[in-house]
Amino acid sequence: MSDTLQLGEAATPPVPAEKPRHKARLALLKRLADVVSLPSSRVNAFERSVTADLLVEILRDAEFDERARVARRLASLVEIPNCLVRLILRDELDIAHSLLADSTALSDADLIDCIRHATGAHRRLIAQRRGVSEVVAEALVEVGETLVVEALLRNDQARLSPPSIEMIVAMTQQQSQLAPMLLRRPELRPNHAYVMFWWCDADARRAILQRFAVSREVLQEAAGDVFPMAAAEGWQDGLTRKALQFIERRQRNRAAIDKSPFQNLDDAIAAAEAGMTREIAEEIAYLAGVKPMTGAKIMTDVGGEALAVLCKATGLPRNALRQLWRGLRRPETTSDGEPAPAMARTLEVFDMIAVDRAQTVLRYWNWSLSSAMTPELMKAIREADDAALDEFSVPQRAAMLAFGADLKR
């Protein structure tokens, strides 16, 4: 196109730059922000508060650019009047960003107010802040937004409380991508990981067993002299008996042999190879020293790794795991004649985990999945009464998480 005007063409007059509207308002906003920013040696708390109130009234109906200027001006302050903070934090993200990303003047109360009244984008930015406190993290997790929780789990400087961890553990049932991130958090404890095991994928399960399958050697040394004391009392104290059952080295239930149609656990496994029945499954559970409910959970586990834990904890040989696998009618090979992936993973877990560590996992499962199933707990599960979690013990909460989905169906 030619730069020269053709004959008859009219020259388009240049568009003048738009002059800022409300020049007086811009000047006033700057002056008020300046006063709010003065050090305490120049303005007292009451004067600052009155100025902030006036500034808030103007900002409520101010233009975007005007609000953004004030937000940027205040972001560097170490002390900002509360009314101004909350107004700005509830504003559009482009305006709130300067405070949420950089300001050190924000209290936990300010951040929680923003979490409750702003958008998911605001919450993600809060989750990325340095040094997110436990109460702020808990408020973020309570909203239940996956992207926010992901940002929080990636934030190494955030601190997560036990209730936050439990809420995220529950979220992993439907949001499996959270599990690997949660497993890297230092706040995660064995009781959380053992519960999450049931719905995690193979990689996460392996990580759980490698990291959280701990030895009970220290406990056994510390409580070694308590066993003869409890035996002398006839094991009358149920609380002591229950705790010592978790600590002791022996896993198999010798007393169950006298009542069993099988000579030992190995014979029960051999009988199951021809076809698992409910009666045989219950006998295997009793002989293995766990409740039938725990045994059922292990044998119906889709992945199969739980079977490896059961066999290793009870001192069964590798072949017994194969017998149990066949009895449950699980495929050992693929259509191409290759080992079935699930079977291969299960054998790897069996070879990987030590007997004592497998016993810790198995006993925690038995503790949390059976003894904790009180009528109150069952009712809470059915009603999905998340508010009642605090009323229950650690193993009870574990049972709520592990069995909640099954009992709701």
Image (spheres, helix red, strand yellow):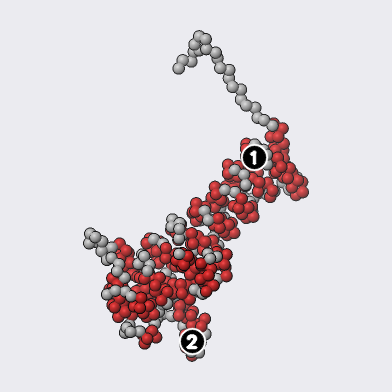
Q: Mark 2 belongs to which amino acid?
A: Trp
Percent coordinates x, y for residue 329 in the rendering:
29, 69
**Where is 186 relative to 16, above or below?**
below
What label sits on residue 67 in the rendered view? 1
What label sits on residue 15 in the rendered view? none
Mark yes or no: residue 16 visible: yes
Q: Residue at x 61, y 22 (%)?
A: 16
SS category of the residue bearing label 2: loop
CA distance for labels 2 and 1: 72 Å
SS category of the residue bearing label 1: helix
Mark yes or no: residue 315 visible: no
Quick one: 111 or 301, which is closer to the camera? 301
- The residue pinned by badge 2 equals 235
Quarter of the rendering containing residue 135: bottom right
Circle 2 residues within 10 Å: few <14, some 14–19, many ≥20: some
Percent coordinates x, y for residue 362 in the rendering:
41, 73
Side of 130 relative to 61 (left or right): left
